[in-house]
Amino acid sequence: MTRLFNDPATFAEDMVAGFAAAHPEHIRAVHGGVVRAQKSPRAKVAVLTGGGSGHYPAFCGVVGEGFADGSVIGNVFTSPSAAQAYSVGREADTGAGVLFMFGNYAGDVMNFGQAAQRLTSEGTPARTFAVTDDIASAPPEDLAKRRGIAGGFTVYKTASAAAEEGADLDEVVRVAEHTNARTRTLGVAFAGCTLPGQREPLFTVPEGKLGLGLGIHGEPGVSESALTSAEELARTLVEGLLAERPEGVTDNRVAVILNGLGATKYEELYVVWGTVARLLADAGLEPVRPEVGELVTSLDMAGCSLTLTWLDDELERLWLAPADTPAFCRGRLTHADGPVAAARATTPEPRAAAAPSALELATGAAAETSATAVRALRAAHTVLHEQEEALGRLDAVAGDGDHGRGMCKGVDAALAAAETAHAEGVAPAPLLAAAGDAWAAEAGGTSGALWGAALRALGAGLPADRAPEPAEWGAGARAALDAVTSLGGAEPGDKTLVDALDPFVTAFTRGTGAGEEPAAAFAAAAGEARTAAEATAELRPKLGRARPLAERSVGTPDPGATSLALVLNALTPLGG
């Protein structure tokens, strides 16, 4: 279990502070993550890796010359927020554009995508790339739906090396696409990991069994089989990957990673590697600088994964290119004027944060609407903290177990922002916008982005100079639903929070449109949301991290729908 921490809620922040203190020659901490200690003296594409913490040395451990220019660091197993990604992108940019690279998870896709859009709109070209190497998470005909696990290390390395050589943004993206198309990973788990502050692992594996096809966010394997010998395990991994050899690829040189997930000893990995090397040779494959060790972990999970990347001349050159980072060093980096160490520049001063935009002041009845919003967030704060562990357990059935903690971090930030705005006399729309932005920034993940968008959209539909009419409350609720579905792409039946939000909005707008008092319409709609959330137990997830474990999820309500229903039923009645 994870034993060493202070406050579990600040585990990621405390880790980053210590990491920066330990490696000042390589990195410096910035809002949202870390960047290289010294910016490149020339304009080059800034390659930024990122995701939730708990995976060291991925992602921050490979920031340095020859590898990543920075890393965006979210809470444990939770994607960083768009605000964090944007901040790191601004700090790392040297004038040639930014490429965000991450595993293919809904929250990462959403938040990094928003950050890239914002940077591009401000004149900094920014792109995103999601790695899809996990062969257990979707069949070959659905490659785009596969998760990104340890194979991301190879993709990040080659793309970073291309950027270091001076390739432009389009070319770096092409290298990432090319590497990803030739990369396959299969992993197994022997025991689940434990989040900081929790006593029980996110999942367990029966004695004498292994979970085949694990995720790196504490997700269990997609199936279980007998754990026999290291030789049999090696055979399972190699045969699984060889069966997925990319179509049309004739090259026999492969980059190979035998990756430990946090609690598997290096000696055990080398025992497995002995058989892997023999089986690859028997298959006519030539490993090129294989890596055996911990490169993409999952806290203290016991298990390992095997990655193969089929190389060509270009990818071999980039895979072997020198790098100097806290966790990965290869070769000797030099510049035209001598060794890297002699060419390091003075650490640039951090950019000043942009000043917040002016907020509109509220008076009279509008101020009471702002007060109602604050009371509602206080009620949400209470119920989410009461149910944090229960929501985490619910999420751990087929996900990564971080939902309760993420919701608490989000509502904490939202409530603080709303209370500050209300004390300053801010109108409902900017107050809810501030609360939504704070929720998204601090919670990260898919839920953080969706709750942030919903609060902002709700506020945008409310008047600034008077109390809302019943129909305006309904229109605001509808706007919140539209924002969530537009951003996340979910529909009713996908087993997400939309399955509770949609019936709530339908019932609420129907009630307010029929002339019911908003408080009464709200209470009735919240009841429908609770019923709908419970009914998600019978659904199979079609989106998000639970999708690869769809069968395991059946019989358990969706955590996002459940937390939404809890909040809706705990809110202070509107206008009360």
Image: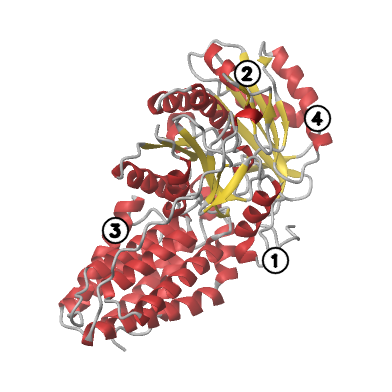
Q: Which mark is residue 270?
A: 4
Q: Which mark is residue 483?
A: 3
| C-alpha distance separating marks 1 and 3 | 37 Å
Choose mark 4 or mark 1, whichever is in front: 1
Which amino acid, by three-letter code, is at mark 1? Asn
Which amino acid, by three-letter code, is at mark 2? Val
Q: Residue at x 44, y 76 (%)?
A: 380
Q: Which callout, 4 or 1, points at the residue further toward the start of the chain? A: 1
Q: For this view, does 451 lie left or right of residue 35?
A: left
Question: Element under label 1?
Answer: loop
Q: Which callout, 1 or 2, points at the residue further toward the start of the chain? A: 1
Q: Which callout, 1 or 3, points at the residue further toward the start of the chain? A: 1
Q: Residue under circle 2?
A: 254
Q: Residue at x 24, y 69 (%)?
A: 476
Choose mark 1 or mark 3, whichever is in front: 1
The image shows residue 78 at horizontal and vertical percentages of: 53, 54
